[in-house]
Amino acid sequence: LRRPMEKDIPELAQMAWEFEQYLLKVDPGLVEETPSKEVFKNVLEQGFNDPKHYMIVAEKKNDGGLVGLADFWAYPEFLHGGITGYFNNLFIREGWRGKGIGQMLFENAMAEAKGRGLVAMHIGVKAGNTKALEFYKKMGINEELVMLETRV
Ligand SMILES: CC(C)(COP(=O)(O)OP(=O)(O)OC[C@H]1O[C@@H](n2cnc3c(N)ncnc32)[C@H](O)[C@@H]1OP(=O)(O)O)[C@@H](O)C(=O)NCCC(=O)NCCS
């Protein structure tokens, strides 16, 4: 595991695109269009050096390419009385799932959140992504909070 570098942005954008393709399969009713890799790249660049953003990636040995990523944003949330995290993206590339990498990335992000003094973490999971829900249950997350989404 390591922190991402600017040079990773194109590969991260590719992974974001693969993640969207995965989610489209989970929820075929999803009407949104997958943004282009260029759009993913631009948005990734915006968060890259922002101290409120944390990202961790898993890489194959000897610079062999990225296999997974996790990230969260931290923001002051008055109802929780402190800094709260929003953990939206945990993605392991096809062929690399079920090897403990998701757990490593998730635990790393939670340890970082603890170190930063966050009071809570909200974890975004698409309704219907039962595999991910099973994974998070396995990670000990049992409190459910429903989040709605709309385009603005
Ligand atoms: C969900 C995901 C992040 C899990 O990562 P992973 O690397 O495959 O999972 P791990 O190998 O670290 O599994 C950790 C534990 O969770 C369990 N687990 C993982 N996937 C599971 C599933 N689908 N059902 C039940 N348990 C599961 C594993 O069995 C393991 O427990 P064990 O140590 O007792 O065997 C990964 O499969 C993935 O990227 N999926 C596609 C994208 C996605 O849905 N992301 C999450 C939504 S934001």
Image: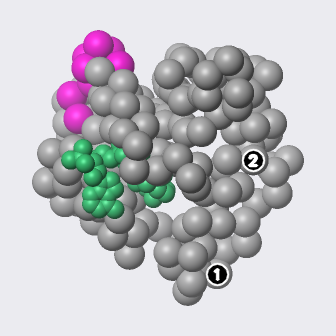
Q: Residue at x 47, y 45 (%)?
A: 90
Q: Nearer the viewer, residue 139 or 150?
A: 139
Residue identifier under label 1? 31
Name above or below for residue 92 compared with residue 21: above
Colour convention: one colour
Q: Residue furthest top?
A: 115
The magenta stretch is: 112-120
Q: Position of residue 57 (x, y in %)?
A: 55, 29
Residue 145 within the segment the image draws in magenta? no
Q: Secondary structure at mark 1?
A: loop
Residue at horizontal 82 percent and vertical 57 percent from the top: 36
The answer to whether residue 78 is left or right of residue 18 is left
Q: Can residue 40 be seen at all in this image of the molecule?
A: no
Point out residue 83 in the picture as x, y percentages from the top left corner: 31, 26
Is residue 113 a member of the stretch shown in magenta? yes
Q: Quadrant of residue 129?
A: bottom left
Instruction: Mark 1 vs mark 2: give the one in front.
Output: 2
Q: Secondary structure at mark 2?
A: helix
Going by the image, does 133 lie left or right of 58?
A: left
Position of residue 81 relative to residue 31, above or below, is above
Quickly name the residue at label 2.
14
Q: Nearer the viewer, residue 99 or 53?
A: 99
Of pointers 1 and 2, the one earlier in the residue sequence: 2
Label 1 is placed on what type of residue? Val
Q: Position of residue 45 (x, y in %)?
A: 74, 30
Outermost residue, bottom direction?
A: 29
Q: Residue at x 70, y 31 (%)?
A: 65
Q: Position of residue 81 (x, y in %)?
A: 19, 30
For mark 1, does the 10 Å Cα neighbourhood hold few (<14), some (14 to 19), or many (20 or more) residues?
few
